[in-house]
Image (tube, rainbow, N blue to C red):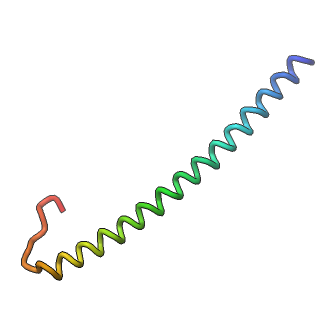
C-alpha cells in the first residue's frame, strides 16, 4: 500500500509540474505571436514608406 501511495504522489507531482510548464510555454508562445504580429505590421509600414520614397525600385526575386 505504501508503494502505491508513493507512486500516486510521484504522479501528482509530475502532473503539477507539467501543468506549470504548459502554462509557462503558453505565455511564451502568446508573447512570440504578439511580437511576430508587431514585426509584420512594422515591416508593412517600412515597405509602404520605401514604396513612397522610391516607387521605381522593384522587389528582389526572393520576395
Q: Residue at x 57, y 47 (%)?
A: 25
In the rendered view of the protein, which quadrant contains the C terminus? bottom left
Q: Which residue is outermost to the right? A: 1
Image coordinates for residue 5, horizontal then vertical, percent: 88, 24
Query: Is 5 rendered above or below residue 48?
Result: above
Q: Is residue 31 left or right of residue 9?
A: left
Image coordinates for residue 50, horizontal then vertical, percent: 18, 75
The residue lying toward the viewer, choosing from 47 and 62, is 47
Image coordinates for residue 9, horizontal then vertical, percent: 82, 28
Q: Residue at x 86, y 17 (%)?
A: 3
In the rendered view of the protein, which quadrant contains the N terminus? top right
The residue lying toward the viewer, choosing from 51 and 18, is 51
Query: Is 52 rendered above or below residue 20?
Result: below
Query: Is 53 rendered above or below residue 15?
Result: below
Image coordinates for residue 4, horizontal then vertical, percent: 86, 21
Q: Residue at x 91, y 18 (%)?
A: 2
Q: Which residue is outermost to the bottom? A: 52
Q: Which residue is outermost to the left? A: 56
Q: Is residue 14 left or right of residue 42?
A: right
> Residue 17, located in which quarter of the rendered image?
top right
Q: Residue at x 63, y 45 (%)?
A: 22
> Residue 35, located in which quarter of the rendered image?
bottom left
Give the mark count.
0
Query: Is 60 rendered above or below residue 25?
Result: below
Amino acid at each position: 500500500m505504501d508503494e502505491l501511495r508513493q507512486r500516486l504522489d510521484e504522479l501528482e507531482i509530475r502532473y503539477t509540474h507539467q501543468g506549470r510548464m504548459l502554462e509557462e510555454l503558453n505565455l511564451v508562445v502568446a508573447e512570440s505571436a504578439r511580437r511576430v504580429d508587431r514585426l509584420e505590421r512594422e515591416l508593412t509600414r517600412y515597405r509602404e514608406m520605401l514604396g513612397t520614397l522610391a516607387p521605381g525600385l522593384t522587389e528582389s526575386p526572393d520576395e
